[in-house]
């Protein structure tokens, strides 16, 4: 098997693009990323991948914990209190027990995460409840917001969402609900008379599981990228992108499922045998929902839907990180400061020093790293675009002009999404955007 | 005792001219020099005898006795407040100076010269000495505007300022000379009611000369046209000195020399003065609303607010005059605060245009503290209760309403219009969404913020404890009002009090 | 006549496909009378996939089966018939576009048919140079 590295096309078999983003399209056609290939960009995105991977290691574990164990708890006050068993839960794609050992990370929770969970930003070991109430913890609210975006935008490809409305799924839910609320006549009666209430809640939880399983893969990928960079492994931004493309293919077939545990009993709300895959049912909907769409974030800028400040059609939503105004007061489809805060705790030193040299240093580090994050997500999106091109279209050096034209049209269609003024694609072309 | 207030800044100025100091060190030295008169003024506040409404701390040195010019200093409550304001704002102005100012030694030296001269003018008990010090300010100020001015029009503005103020000086000199000649005074020594012996027509004529002279300085409409250009062209510290202190020389002159020397004429003219004040207030406020440049807006607001001072004087009640005297201080503090903040905004953001500024309240990339203080300054200027602007304006209105009801109400309307333009200013400048494309402003350091913080604290403190401000001017104001004729004199002198209808009872 | 599976097993260059079909448990299905039209990627086609892709799929038979059934169409369709239809639904559910490419090549989605119309007892096989994927 050959590692996927893109040779540069030798000659132009089709005329240059006339798209407003022609430069970027030509770069993509040459195997590049939407993010310009500069050492500064490479340093930024790799550093932020690492800072993202640590809280992500918590996110995926807690998402699965909520989906599998907390389940329908009507008062889930402690859903962010991750039990040890979930901290020890071996990652399916890292550690010695991995299904596929192509990334070197350990199977258990990352040591930096454990250290942070213990001492928090305060640097003091206090009972967990104090760290929690002081909000000195990993901001699971961010992960839940991403999940919410996926739930809300629903039908974005894949068959996951369709399945959640089948009788089969409802029957699975009935079993789990009956077991979970055993000896609780109130809830059982409620379910009997208003079944859609808990079905909808189950769908919500199935998306928890979906996103948890998606991130379970991304965390070791990002850790591995950071390690490779530290060893001097990446030559440029396209290398980092190709690594992601390979990663996407490697785990494309990982099953997406939702299991619920009541005591020792396992209920398969979404069984593995439904053949939902990581690529089609998790990754692509995730990118669409979180990177592109999400929802207008209620920051200090408010939107008036009656005045059509919010698109009438969900597919026209454009509040994701690729469009986000990273200023905390601006718009961003995810509670942006929560993630920035999480990432700030785990910045590698080289990135911390880098931010100190620009703008207001430590004072606006959240914005600076937020914009770095935006850059890095443009690179991830580039990887997704290249992966889709690899999977559905043709090699970049395909000598057949028809094929090259098909690739061109695909790239142009993708870039069309960044024509709207909110898109930050233009901004990230310059290093001065920070 | 009082000489220190004049000669320490001047000696400091000379020392700074001569010593080879570079930027930051020159600034520190200037701050050190300026701190001494401030501390000294505070000491004078503690020593000032509130029970004595007259002049205190007398100092006399014969100088050119043949000319009637003597070095004659003294202070009453009005001078005390002005001297204190001058000392404070000098320090603020130096503190507001950019670290990288060109030719720093010359700049700080000139600034201190101005400060020393102004202190002298406020203390002078000799008309000629006052005139000399008043005129002598022009040179350093002209240089300060022409050399360190902030825009391309600075030479034009400096020249305009020079011409207007020189004209003001000429009128003043004419007024003083006339007063002394016609009243057969032996020299130029100031004494209250020295003009009273003159026929009313003469008094009126002389007073009008002085009135116009000081109206230019204040300035009052229609003698204000130099102000927007000058304030806007001047750099922040110079604008603070101009608006905060020098404008007060105008109102100080109005009270000291017009009201003080010609009480009868003042009483006669007062209804017209009240109308004049109202026109100034409304003109300043309405023009400010139309501005697109925040510094210009603040400059026009100054015209409006100085109008309240004249209204307070015109009303001729001790309450109103106390308010007017206090308003001089409060206006000085608030204007200095606003100019300082506008200066910071301009330095950091690089523009003063309302159409460009936006979202500075942004906590991370904006100028949140500056914005917050700007809100406070705007509120103080608009007369929001709890801030010093409210107290002083309220005193003026309260004192003048019973005398000039309609004029007062129109001035209250002007106060309302102040809110309008400050809401416009704050809404555009501080609120809204900060534009990412331009939002790479440098951080505002604590030392840059310090002058504004100190002023804001004072504005707030004096708003809550107005007595700390009002009590100094009150005896003097009461004394001045007592010197006024109980009935407005008339040129024909035929109307007696008994012929007038009784004043309507207050509600 | 041999079934589709027999042909794949006995033809050189389809060992990955055969292993995959076995892992996915589709052998029996493809031995039923059908008939089926199978787009069969050869070993080179599988080799083009980045590392780990096939391994992950083989570990997860339902998911592997889904990818494989995207290569299978119910009914027996020759190249000519397919080109006339332009598009046909796979057993997986997603449609497969079919067209004539430059120089009269027979193109199935983003793959080119290397050998078309290989008749089997229970269907027909078209050999692809790429693994095709849904979407």
Image (cartoon, rainbow, N blue to C red):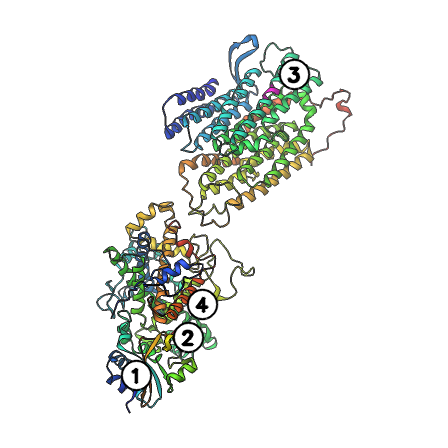
Observer-nearest residue: B96 or C118? C118
Farthest-out residue, bottom: C1
**Looking at the picture, do discs 3 and 2 lie on one chain?**
no
Q: Indicate which label's residue lies in the foreground, 4 or 2.
A: 4
**Looking at the picture, do discs 4 and 2 lie on one chain?**
yes
Q: Is residue A100 magenta?
A: no
How far apart, in angstroms, are the residues tagged by discs 4 and 1? 35 Å
Question: Is the C-beta separation of discs 3 and 2 under 8 Å?
Answer: no
Residue that carries the numbered disc 2 in the rendered image: A164
Residue that carries the numbered disc 1 in the rendered image: C26
The segment highlighted magenta reads B168-172
C87 with respect to B388 (left or right):
left
Mark 4 lies on a secondary structure that is helix
Farthest-out residue, top: B66
How far apart, in angstroms, are the residues tagged by discs 2 and 1? 26 Å
A296 with respect to B398 (left or right):
left
Where does residue B472 sit, x and y in percent of width and height?
A: 54, 26
How far apart, in angstroms, are the residues tagged by discs 3 and 1? 119 Å
User: Measuring 54% from the left and 35% from the top, which residue is drawn there?
Assistant: B388
Where does residue A79 sit, x and y in percent of width and height?
A: 36, 64
Residue that carries the numbered disc 4 in the rendered image: A153
User: Measuring 72% from the left and 22% from the top, which residue is drawn there?
Assistant: B489
């Amino acid at each position: 098997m050959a590692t996927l590295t893109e040779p540069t096309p030798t000659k132009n078999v089709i005329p240059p693009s006339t798209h407003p983003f022609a430069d970027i399209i030509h770069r993509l056609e040459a195997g590049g990323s939407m993010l310009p290939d500069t050492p500064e960009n490479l340093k930024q995105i790799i550093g932020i991948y690492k800072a993202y991977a640590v809280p992500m290691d918590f996110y995926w574990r807690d998402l699965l914990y909520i989906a599998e164990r907390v389940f329908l708890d009507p008062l889930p006050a402690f859903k962010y209190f991750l039990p040890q068993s979930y901290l020890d839960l071996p990652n399916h794609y890292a550690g010695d027990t991995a299904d596929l050992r192509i990334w070197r990370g350990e199977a258990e929770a990352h040591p930096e995460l454990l250290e942070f969970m213990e001492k928090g930003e305060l640097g003091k070991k206090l009972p967990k409840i104090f760290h929690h109430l002081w909000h000195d913890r990993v901001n699971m609210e961010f992960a839940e917001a991403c999940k919410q975006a996926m739930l809300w935008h629903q039908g974005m490809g894949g068959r996951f969402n369709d399945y959640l409305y089948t009788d089969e799924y409802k029957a699975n839910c009935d079993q789990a609900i009956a077991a979970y609320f055993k000896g609780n006549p109130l809830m059982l009666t409620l379910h009997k008379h208003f079944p859609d209430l808990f079905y909808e809640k189950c769908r919500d939880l199935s998306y928890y599981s979906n996103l948890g399983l998606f991130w379970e893969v991304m965390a070791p990928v990002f850790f591995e990228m950071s390690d490779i960079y530290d060893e001097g492994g990446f030559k440029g931004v396209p290398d980092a992108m190709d690594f992601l493309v390979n990663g996407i293919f490697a785990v494309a077939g990982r099953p997406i499922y939702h299991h619920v545990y009541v005591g020792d009993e396992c209920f398969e709300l979404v069984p593995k045998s439904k053949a939902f895959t990581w690529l089609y049912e998790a990754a692509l909907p995730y990118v669409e929902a979180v990177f592109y769409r999400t929802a207008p974030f209620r920051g200090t800028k408010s939107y008036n839907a009656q005045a059509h400040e919010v698109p009438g059609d969900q597919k026209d939503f454009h509040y994701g990180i690729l469009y986000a105004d990273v200023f905390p007061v601006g718009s961003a489809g995810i509670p942006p400061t929560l993630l920035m805060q999480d990432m700030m705790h785990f910045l590698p030193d080289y990135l911390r020093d880098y931010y100190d040299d620009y703008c207001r240093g430590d004072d606006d580090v959240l914005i600076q790293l937020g914009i770095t994050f935006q850059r890095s997500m443009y690179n991830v999106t580039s990887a997704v675009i290249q992966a889709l091109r690899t999977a559905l279209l043709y090699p970049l050096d395909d000598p057949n002009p028809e094929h090259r034209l098909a690739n061109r049209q695909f790239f142009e269609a993708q870039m069309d999404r960044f024509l709207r003024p909110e898109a930050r694609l233009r901004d990230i072309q310059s290093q001065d955007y920070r | 005792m009082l000489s220190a207030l004049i000669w320490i800044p001047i000696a400091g100025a000379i020392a700074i001219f001569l010593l080879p100091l570079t930027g930051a060190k020159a600034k520190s030295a200037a701050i050190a020099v300026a701190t001494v008169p401030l501390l000294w003024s505070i000491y004078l506040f503690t020593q000032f005898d509130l029970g004595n409404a007259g002049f205190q701390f007398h100092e006399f040195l014969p100088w050119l006795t043949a000319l009637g010019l003597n070095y004659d200093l003294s202070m009453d409550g009005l001078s005390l407040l002005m001297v204190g304001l001058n000392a404070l704002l000098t320090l603020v102005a130096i503190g507001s100076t950019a670290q990288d100012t060109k030719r720093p030694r010359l700049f700080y030296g000139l600034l201190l010269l101005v400060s020393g001269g102004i202190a002298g003018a406020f203390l002078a008990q000799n008309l000629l000495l006052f005139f000399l010090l008043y005129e002598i300010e022009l040179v350093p100020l002209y240089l300060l505007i022409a050399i360190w001015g902030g825009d391309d029009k600075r030479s034009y503005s400096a020249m305009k300022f020079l011409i207007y103020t020189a004209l003001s000086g000429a009128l003043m000199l004419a007024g003083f000379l006339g007063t002394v000649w016609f009243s057969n005074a032996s020299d130029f020594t100031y004494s209250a009611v020295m003009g009273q012996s003159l026929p009313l027509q003469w008094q009126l004529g002389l007073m009008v000369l002085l009135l116009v002279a000081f109206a230019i300085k204040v300035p009052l409409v229609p003698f204000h046209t130099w102000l927007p250009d000058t304030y806007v062209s001047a750099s922040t510290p110079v604008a603070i000195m101009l608006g905060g202190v020098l404008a007060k020389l105008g109102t100080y002159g109005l009270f000291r020399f017009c009201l003080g020397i010609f009480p009868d004429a003042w009483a006669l003219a007062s209804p017209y003065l009240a109308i004049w004040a109202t026109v100034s207030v409304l003109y300043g406020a309405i023009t400010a609303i139309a501005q697109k440049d925040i510094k210009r807006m603040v400059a026009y607001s100054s015209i409006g607010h100085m109008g309240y001072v004249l209204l307070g004087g015109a009303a001729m009640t001790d309450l109103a005059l106390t308010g007017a005297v206090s308003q001089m201080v409060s206006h000085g503090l608030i204007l200095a605060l606003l100019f300082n903040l506008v200066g910071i905004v301009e330095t950091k953001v690089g523009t003063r245009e309302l159409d460009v500024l936006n979202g500075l309240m942004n906590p991370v990339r904006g100028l949140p503290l500056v914005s917050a203080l700007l809100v406070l300054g705007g509120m103080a200027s608009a007369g929001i209760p709890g801030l010093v602007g409210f107290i002083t304006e309220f005193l003026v209105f309260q004192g003048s309403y019973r005398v000039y009801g309609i004029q007062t109400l129109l001035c209250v309307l002007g106060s309302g219009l102040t809110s309008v333009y400050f809401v416009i200013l704050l809404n555009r400048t501080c609120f809204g969404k900060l534009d990412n494309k331009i939002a790479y402003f440098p951080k505002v350091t604590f030392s840059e913020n310090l002058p504004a913080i100190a002023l804001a604290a004072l504005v707030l403190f004096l708003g809550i404890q107005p007595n700390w401000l009002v009590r100094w001017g009150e005896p003097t104001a009461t004394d001045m009002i007592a010197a006024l004729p109980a009935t407005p004199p008339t040129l024909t002198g035929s109307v007696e009090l008994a012929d007038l209808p009784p004043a309507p009872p207050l509600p | 006549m041999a079934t589709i599976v027999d042909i794949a097993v006995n033809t050189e260059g389809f060992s990955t496909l055969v292993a995959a079909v076995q892992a996915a448990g589709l052998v029996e299905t493809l031995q039923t009378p059908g008939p089926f039209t199978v787009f069969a990627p050869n070993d080179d086609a599988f080799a083009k996939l980045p590392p780990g892709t096939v391994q992950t799929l083989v570990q997860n038979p339902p998911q592997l089966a889904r990818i494989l059934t995207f290569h299978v169409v119910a009914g027996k369709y020759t190249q000519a018939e397919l080109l006339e239809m332009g598009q046909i639904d796979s057993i997986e559910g997603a449609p497969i576009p079919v067209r004539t490419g430059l120089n009269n090549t027979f193109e199935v989605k983003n793959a080119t048919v290397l050998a078309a119309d290989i008749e089997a007892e229970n269907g027909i096989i078209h050999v692809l140079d790429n693994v095709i994927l849904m979407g």
